[in-house]
């Protein structure tokens, strides 16, 4: 049988839409084998979703372990153990410092040894943090300095576990589900992160009140230990062998996208840190509703528009989301009632929701597949930087200009992020237009 010439099957797929230029497998080569009934689109989509959630689960466990003691430890260290408030703050921040410093290393582990190994080490570290937390609680401040030292060690180990577990889980999911599902994996990881923190914080408060701090250590040991066993039974994905990009090259390629993420995240950081004080300065009630509105809108946007990135592309979605977020922050700045602030918080959450996966997809494209774990680790660092640097900078802005000005500061940052993403998108468009259809077609011969 003589098949049609290959050029009749040349199509270029640009963000999910077909156009001339790229080789596709003919339809008869894509058909299922004889005797195999093709799965319906809905059934295939549900199976794909379950497959992704099997890896996102490990991110959820990491951040549940973080959320459980989050609302308890400052008061525990300051009021019960009797240490200065600065040490109570250090107990919280030291975990994030460990996460910040270890993320690039976790990405390199995922690239060179394997994403499964990274997750196994991450679950092991989280389990060890539970053991240390239980030990600190068992000492019962006798002596207090030893209990505090073990508590700080627990937080450091948990920070490293977060880096290894979440970075490995993300890369494991992307590799197992296929590059076409990169945006979905990153999006569901974000839902798992915020959902786990939202569940863990109140659950930890209830457990500490009923059974003491040690109960949180026990739950962490059981949950993370079981997850370690679960991860060990999952099939690994092959490690892409070959020369890996030097760290400085990965950093150079990811920095523009990371800066867009860091500046775009200022809206959330400011809202989470200062909305309570902002409400108090206006004698309003219901500051917690703003955070609830942000979280609900954030999750709703990811669930409703999770396929938008694969269809329209990361940069168009990122630009649209940053515009929406800037409108939300603008409303917060000019709010004259608690309900106006509530609406601004919801718009901020809705807009910021897809910024991380949208820019993350484009950042990952900038590096070879064998270095994508490192790229993910480096990219995520910028979200950590945004959260930690905003506190002192925004605090200085408030001291000089008042509480409302902090949202103007956030607006300037979000608009700067929008400008960066527009420049990146324009540059990418020029690079694509430089590749003529004739050259693209010849590269396929």
Image (cartoon, rainbow, N blue to C red):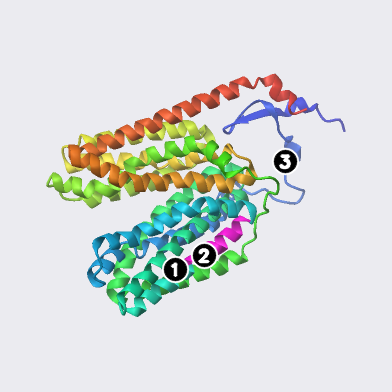
**Closest to the observer: 267 or 352?**
267
Q: In the rendered image, is residue 49 in sight?
A: no
Please tell me whether mark 1 or mark 3 is closer to you in this view: 1
Residue 36, numbered circle: none
Give the quarter of the figure containing the N terminus: top right
Residue with the mark numbered 2: 123
* Left or right relative to 173: residue 98: left
Neighbor class of circle 3 (other Cα within 10 Å; few <14, some 14-19, many 20+) is: few
**Closest to the observer: 410 or 155?**
155
Secondary structure of the residue carrying numbered label 3: helix
Secondary structure of the residue carrying numbered label 2: helix
> Above or below — where is 443 with respect to 98?
above
What x and y, as percent, mark residue 400? 19, 38
* Left or right relative to 155: residue 72: left
What x and y, as percent, mark residue 382? 44, 44
Residue for point 66% across, 19% down: 436
Residue with the mark numbered 3: 30
Residue for point 35% across, 57% down: 93
What x and y, as percent, mark residue 227? 52, 66
Please tell me whether mark 2 or mark 1 is closer to you in this view: 1
Residue for point 77% across, 48% down: 34
> Above or below — where is 370 with respect to 71?
above
Could you say which quadrant of the image residue 144 lies in? Answer: bottom left
Residue 129, numbered circle: 1
Residue range in magenta is 114-126
Q: CA distance from mark 2 to mark 1?
A: 10 Å
Q: CA distance from mark 1 to mark 3?
A: 48 Å
């Amino acid at each position: 049988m003589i098949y049609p010439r290959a050029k009749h099957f040349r199509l270029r797929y640009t963000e999910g839409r077909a156009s001339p230029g790229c080789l596709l497998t003919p339809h008869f080569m894509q058909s299922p084998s004889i005797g195999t009934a093709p799965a319906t689109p809905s059934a295939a989509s549900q199976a794909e979703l379950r497959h992704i959630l099997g890896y996102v689960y490990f991110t959820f466990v990491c951040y549940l372990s973080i959320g459980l003691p989050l609302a308890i430890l400052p008061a525990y260290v300051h009021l019960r153990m009797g240490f200065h408030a600065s040490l109570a703050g250090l107990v919280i921040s030291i975990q994030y410092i460990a996460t910040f410093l270890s993320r690039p290393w976790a990405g390199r582990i995922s690239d060179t040894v394997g994403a499964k190994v990274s997750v196994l080490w991450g679950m092991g570290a989280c389990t060890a943090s539970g053991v240390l937390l239980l030990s600190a609680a068992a000492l019962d401040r006798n002596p207090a300095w030893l209990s505090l030292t073990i508590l700080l060690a627990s937080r450091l180990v948990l920070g490293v576990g977060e880096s290894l577990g979440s970075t490995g889980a993300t890369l494991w999911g992307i590799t197992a589900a296929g590059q076409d599902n990169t945006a979905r994996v990153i999006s569901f990881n974000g839902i798992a992160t915020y959902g786990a923190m939202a569940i863990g914080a109140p659950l930890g408060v209830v457990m500490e009140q009923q059974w003491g701090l040690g109960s949180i250590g026990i739950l962490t040991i059981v949950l993370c230990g079981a997850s370690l066993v679960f991860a060990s039974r999952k099939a690994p994905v092959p490690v892409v062998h070959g020369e890996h990009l030097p760290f400085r090259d990965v950093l150079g390629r990811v920095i523009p996208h990371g800066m867009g993420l860091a500046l775009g995240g200022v809206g959330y950081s400011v809202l989470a840190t200062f909305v309570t004080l902002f409400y108090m300065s206006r004698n309003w009630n219901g500051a917690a509703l703003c955070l609830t509105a942000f979280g609900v809108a954030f999750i709703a946007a990811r669930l409703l528009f999770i396929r938008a990135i694969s269809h329209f592309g990361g940069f168009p979605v990122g630009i649209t989301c940053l515009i929406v977020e800037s409108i939300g922050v603008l409303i917060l700045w000019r709010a004259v009632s608690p309900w106006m602030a509530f609406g601004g918080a919801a718009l901020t959450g809705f807009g910021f929701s897809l910024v991380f996966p949208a820019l993350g997809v484009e950042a990952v494209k900038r590096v070879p597949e064998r270095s994508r774990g490192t790229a993910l680790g480096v990219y995520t660092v910028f979200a950590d930087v945004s959260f930690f640097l905003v506190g002192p900078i925004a605090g200085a802005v408030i001291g000089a200009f008042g509480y409302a000005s902090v949202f103007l500061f956030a607006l300037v940052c979000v608009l700067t992020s929008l400008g960066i993403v527009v420049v990146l998108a324009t540059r990418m468009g020029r690079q694509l237009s430089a590749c003529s259809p004739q050259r693209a077609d010849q590269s396929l011969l």
